[in-house]
Image (cartoon, rainbow, N blue to C red):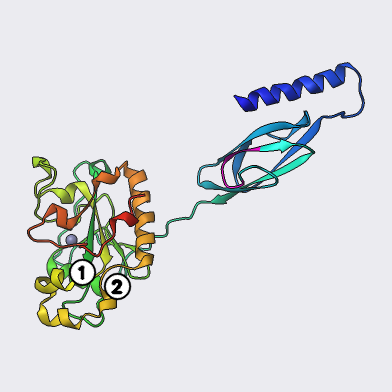
Amino acid sequence: MVMKKLLLTGIVVVQVLTLTGCAVQGDGLTLTIERQGQGRVEPGATKGIARGTIVHLEAEPAVGWSFSNWEGFVSDPTSPETTILMDRPQTVKAIFLPKEELEIPSAPGGLMNWRADGSQIAYRTNGEADIEYIMIHAISDAAANPRNPYDVSRIRSIFDEYGVEAHYLIDREGTIYQFVQDGRIARHAGAGTWNNEPRLTNAMNRYSVGIELMGVGTREEMKDVIGPLANTLVKSADRGYTEAQYLALDLLLHHLQALYQIPAEKIISHQAYDPGRKWDPGELFDWTRIHN
Ligand SMILES: [Zn+2]
């Protein structure tokens, strides 16, 4: 509203100048708008603004772009909505940057459509419309290779060995790999219950996307999972999760949440679904890093 009033004022000033046949610009000041990247700026370039006017500026990024900052003498260079005092001719530039593309390479060996036993990884009954939840897991090779538990090329054989698979895996460097398409039912949740909803009992595979973080839990959490000997051989630096993993997980969650309209409360741990049997991602996983 403020902006519209100012624009009207500007138009009136221009008209008055025209009517009186005044050849000079008088006090009318010019606001020049420049853009970098793709987006819209309101108002556009405006002439004949009265000296002392405060102009409200608004930047709106195009789809796939985000607002970065303003250049020029605006009151708040980092806010998409700001103001500028027209105490002289002014030039402002709105900087838009392309949104960071989420890169998700396929798993080593390609997407899994078939299992090692020759069975097909079936599509969800209602396709992607069935996706309501995201389940977070941890996986490692610590049982077999406790001194070198994070070899991505070992994951497929671990899946085969345990008769499981998940849609995504995030390695220690934060690379996100896709193993199974979202529309297919991966076996990551297994038996469990959630939210007193009978339809979710032992059926979360159908309703969720599974994300595996390469990670090892505490000694206490792992002792029955990888055995006591392997547990003593795991380096303490290999327990828990890395900074790069949290950043990648956050990007992946936002991507999936936007794609399938999944609210934050429907991001759950495997442990919450099956507390008697499962530990992951465990107490070393910092939930405050992803709920933002
Ligand atoms: Zn799990």
Quadrant where the N terminus is found in the figure: top right
Q: For this view, does 254 lie left or right of residue 274?
A: right
**Which residue is depicted at the point 22% across and 42% down?**
130
Q: State whether residue 73 is above or below residue 252.
A: above
Where residue 112 sits: x, y (%)?
25, 62
Q: Tell me which numbered mark, 2 or 1, is placed earlier along the sequence.
A: 2
Q: For this view, does 239 lie left or right of residue 195?
A: right
The residue at which mark 2 appears reads as 152
The residue at which mark 1 appears reads as 217
- Quarter holding residue 19: top right
Give the CA separation, mark 2 to mark 1. 18 Å
State whether residue 175 appears in this view: no
Give the residue type that dot 2 points to: Val
Q: Element at badge 1?
A: loop
Q: Element at badge 2?
A: helix
The magenta stretch spans residue 285: no
Which span is picked out in magenta? 77-83
Give the residue type that dot 1 points to: Gly
**Which residue is depicted at the point 19% across and 83% down?**
233
